[in-house]
Image: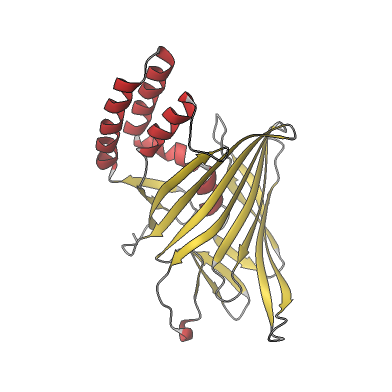
Amino acid sequence: MESLINQEKIFVLHPKPGNKTFEVTHRQFSGDWVDKTIQYELEVSLLNNVNQNGFVYVIDRKNLLIDGSAPDTVFDQLACDCGNALFPMKFLVNSLGEIEQIFEHQQMVERWEIIKNKLINYYEGDTALDYIKLSDSNIRNTGVLKKMMQNHLFVYFFFKPLYGFYQDNKTVTKWKPAPFMDFSFDIPMKQTLVKRKKENNDTDEISDDVFIEIQSDSDVIAINGVYTFNPKDNSLVSCEGTMLLEGKKEIKLTFMTKQEKLPAIAPEQKVMSIV
């Protein structure tokens, strides 16, 4: 994504071609206890062939760990193997951060066929076979895939809240689709751009630390997030997000930039990439 700050101090977020790898941590809680921790790297690439109706991305998941180690239970191994068929995934995101189209679906299905045949020959029992059948049905249906990815925590926090226009220290409320619900509805999401002065002790220079804070206003699902940016170019550095479903199930997601490959930008353009 790209940010542009104009003379009226409007902070605009929209995509720009580039590539970043994020370290992602997903924690599920039971009360005050961490029930499960999932860690992985996710490479996010915005391609140069930007469609006029949106932006074409490729995401690729790597190095999945569960509770600090490679998946070692039967179910975790099976879920990981089935999930591997989804990546890399190429899709079109519209200006609202919604996935509108999945590309190269046939290649994904062919990749899945190879994985599925190995799984059928390896796993026994009705539970495993039922899970494989469900995965087979989901992967073949692009509509189901789009819904699954909209509920993917990284995809939700990376695309949904960030798109739009911001003014310094002003809060705007936008209606966003709620994730993880059995029925579709929108919730009001408060989004605030915060700037804080920061002094460099080595150079005595003062710069702005830029944050974007989001907060839902709903009794059904509580969503909070804080995004940080590199003060040199306003590129996205990290996010800490939390979801509380119906006041019971808490999920926390953090992601931080590990590596980036971005196009060179001329100084006179005054454009900062935040892919």
The structure's colour scheme is: secondary structure
User: Residue 256: x percent and y percent?
Assistant: 56, 57
User: Residue 217: x percent and y percent?
Assistant: 71, 45
Q: Is residue 57 visible?
A: yes
Q: How many marks?
A: 0
Q: From the viewer's perspective, is 92 left or right of 232?
A: left
Quadrant in the picture for residue 15 = bottom left
User: Residue 1: x percent and y percent?
Assistant: 48, 63
Q: From the viewer's perspective, is 194 left or right of 67?
A: right
x 43%, y 83%: residue: 266
Q: Is residue 54 visible?
A: no
Instruction: Identify whether 76 is placed above or below 65.
Output: above
Q: Is 14 or 183 nearer to us in this picture?
A: 14
Furthest-top residue in view?
126
Q: From the viewer's perspective, is 118 left or right of 11?
A: left
Q: Is 230 or 166 nearer to us in this picture?
A: 230
x 40%, y 51%: residue: 59
Instruction: Identify whether 107 is placed above or below 94.
Output: above
Q: Is 54 or 242 nearer to us in this picture?
A: 242
Quadrant in the picture for residue 201 = bottom right
User: Residue 62: x percent and y percent?
Assistant: 42, 47
Q: Is 57 or 113 nearer to us in this picture?
A: 113
